[in-house]
Amino acid sequence: MSGMTWQGWAEIAFTLASTLALGFPLGLYLARVWTGGKTWLDPVLRPVERGVYALVGVKPDQGQRWLGYTGAFLGFSLAGFGLLYLILRTQGLLPLNPQHFAGMAPHLAFNTAISFVTNTNWQSYSGESTLSNLSQMAGLTVQNFASAAAGMAVAAALARAFAANRGETIGNFWADLTRITLYVLLPISLVLALVLVAQGVPQTLAATIDAKTLEGAKQTLVVGPVASQEIIKQLGTNGGGFFGANSAHPFENPNGWSNLIEEIVMNALSFAVFVAFGVVAFARKETRALIAAAAIIVCAAAAVIYVNETLPTPALAHAAHVTATPNMEGEEVRFGAPSTAVWTAMTTGASDGGINGQIESFTPLGGGMALFLIKLGEMTPGGVGSGLYGMVVMAIIAVFVAGLMVGRTPEYLGKKIESREVKFAVLATLILPAALLGFAAVASVLPEALKTVSTSGPHGLTEILYAYSSAVGNNGSAFGGLNANTPWWDTTLAITMGLGRFAYAVPVLALAGSIAAKPRLQPTAGTLPTDGLQFVLLLLGVILILGGLQYFPPLALGPIVEHFQMIAATH
Amino acid sequence: MNALQHLRPAVMMVVLFTLLTGLAYPLAVTGLAQLALPYQAGGSLVRDAGGEVRGSALIAQGFTGAGYLHPRPSAAGTNGYDATSSAGSNLGPMDKKLADRVAGDAKLLAAEAPGPIPADAVTTSGSGLDPDISPENAARQAARIAAARGMGANAVQAIIARYTEAPALGFIGQPRVNVLLVNRALDQAHPIAR
């Protein structure tokens, strides 16, 4: 073990390249699912699909206006929240609970239910010491599917809005939800869950196994239906682990292959949503520019984290005889610096939030890069669905900025972008930093909040910033030293997660309604091309300026200061 | 907002989701996994000749005896290696507690054998249950194990080599040695006199 190696760079390049490569065919398939086209799973799934519509009592072909679509999206999320909250509170009375875990406290159940419904999967608890197998399956696994499908449904609606010519409706939420779950999430999960089991991820209804170690001590192993949750956790960019240590736990992620599969799966479907958007919105070339911007950022981030995780840290550099690199504190031997670096870039770029190493113990800029990726707004490639609509919002702001420069009404994908659309786009992008910075500022001075922050100084500030960034970006990863299971943290983080999901998605759906109603225009000589290198650079500029510069002061006081402290301490 | 009019289909849909993705799907995966891959699905359990469970090949045990390969330090639970409480130390890179812990462990390891101490030997893993150590870490311990068991260093190294795994395809993941499997093989090849 030592510093950077060619194998490390090869692994990072291979992981990112295969993820992107898989995103394209998967996206073409997803587009067919969005548009109700034929798939090879039809013979099995069509009858199930029709059964769902009949039982729920909805007409799948009946288009909804944006308000109706939004109402269905919110109603579904609310009902999901209610049932999950109920299960978590009452798990002590429910079956499949051999460890006799009690129900969660109200603030923890509130936080956890919002967390999983908003696709965040922030966890103020440790799964193996808190949750029964029933809560894991019928509670959390359900929202792993539901929140992912709902996010992808919103993206489908936005795609239809761009395709429409003076349209009134943007699709049917119930049909989108059902088709995405049945044709995409369930079959992929079913197959890949078994692949993960083959690598060593447990899948059993047993909860604990007692072992007598070789030295004669008693060891209690926690098992459960891990694989079925692990795969949808990654596929749906959820990120909530079965175990406290998440995918650093050998039962969630036993070896290099399982790690590679989980990495690919957590970004491939997000990229696929981009591709499907391009197909449905008749904008394949323009979508490639969005994909390029996302890919450039996540690749650069992986490289930055890898470089930093192979820097010597003071603890290792000053201990006699110790090989000072890589930074193995919080990292697993089977992964080492390269697997951990690329995973961390992908999980924070994709709003997944699963971890395979403890980010709190990373070098300042390794962990700082993860924080920065979350702060960019989770669109590189972001959560499934939410990443795409986040990127489209950025593209709208980019054409608006370009339009201001040349003094023309901007257009995007054949639609005029006027004051109403820009207002919705800006509204969406402003609520997030307001919530994040507001709560973080209060928490930085409030004794009630500070008493469970694990350390002081720049690292403590980063811990606070990371928590609220993770919540507002619906990411869910953490600087794990923070004990967030207190009324203050549980409640404020829950509010932040709710805002991050709904205060973004609702303006996006309003935007979709407004875009759908406009006529589709043919590009003219005066239209800014939105498919080439020039637009990629413009878009990158807008993302980095909007997402990056508004957070520069806190980033400078947290990870950047700590980095220079570390460099000074190791020389 | 007209969320209320959507509440009936919403509730029905959540109930269906629960039945389909919360019960049918995990139970189907469980059934198939138990049928086709019972060893892995059950937790990769390591049993002795009498069938008693002695651990999992994927979960660290806190070996301390001189005749055993030692795992990495662990922050899982109060005393480490607690499989019901996976966790990292969550100490930041500039934390004095980390520097003190590493310096203390390094001192003990330097007294035990000469040569450089690999980083994994003095750092806690992300899970606290890391079943592996680096080949360099294992090689450093071979002489101690051989002396404690009264067996040849070459025999110890051969057993370590047998449970050393190279990265997949040569570059996916890192080379690693499974501590529990080495120790079981050591006990089988050359039991410690009790």
Image (cartoon, coloured by chain):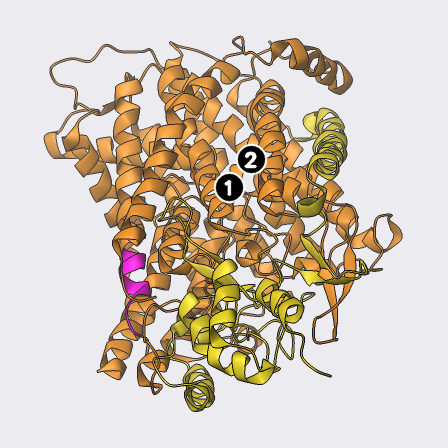
Report the span colored magenta. Answer: A304-312
Which label number is shown at residue A237? 1
Q: Residue at 36% across / 48% down in the picture?
A: B170
* Callouts 2 and 1 in the same chain: yes
How many residues crowd mark 1 within 10 Å: few (<14), some (14–19), many (20+)? many
Q: Which chain does the numbered disc 2 sit on?
A: A
Q: Is residue A52 above or below residue A343?
A: above
Q: Position of residue A402 (x, y in %)?
A: 17, 33
Indicate the amino acid at tag 1. Thr
- Left or right: residue B170 versus residue A171 is left
Q: In 3D space, how far apart are the residues under numbered discs 2 and 1 (Cα atoms)?
A: 7 Å
Q: Quadrant of the N terminus of chain A?
A: bottom left
Q: Is residue A417 visible?
A: no
Q: Identify residue for label 2.
A: A148
Mark 2 or mark 1: whose residue is earlier in sequence: 2
Q: Residue at 70% across / 33% down in the picture?
A: B21
Indicate the amino acid at tag 2. Ala
Q: Secondary structure under badge 1?
A: loop
- Left or right: residue A485 versus residue B170 is right
Q: Position of residue A288 (x, y in %)?
A: 28, 26
Colour assigned to chain B in the rendering is yellow
For the residue pair B66 and A287, the one nearer the viewer reads as B66
Labelled pair 2, 1 in contact (Cβ < 8 Å): yes
Q: Is residue B93 above or below residue A534?
A: below
Q: Quadrant of residue B7?
A: top right
- Left or right: residue B43 versus residue A121 is right
Q: Position of residue A389 (x, y in %)?
A: 41, 32
Colour assigned to chain A in the rendering is orange
Q: Is residue A295 above or below residue A308?
A: above
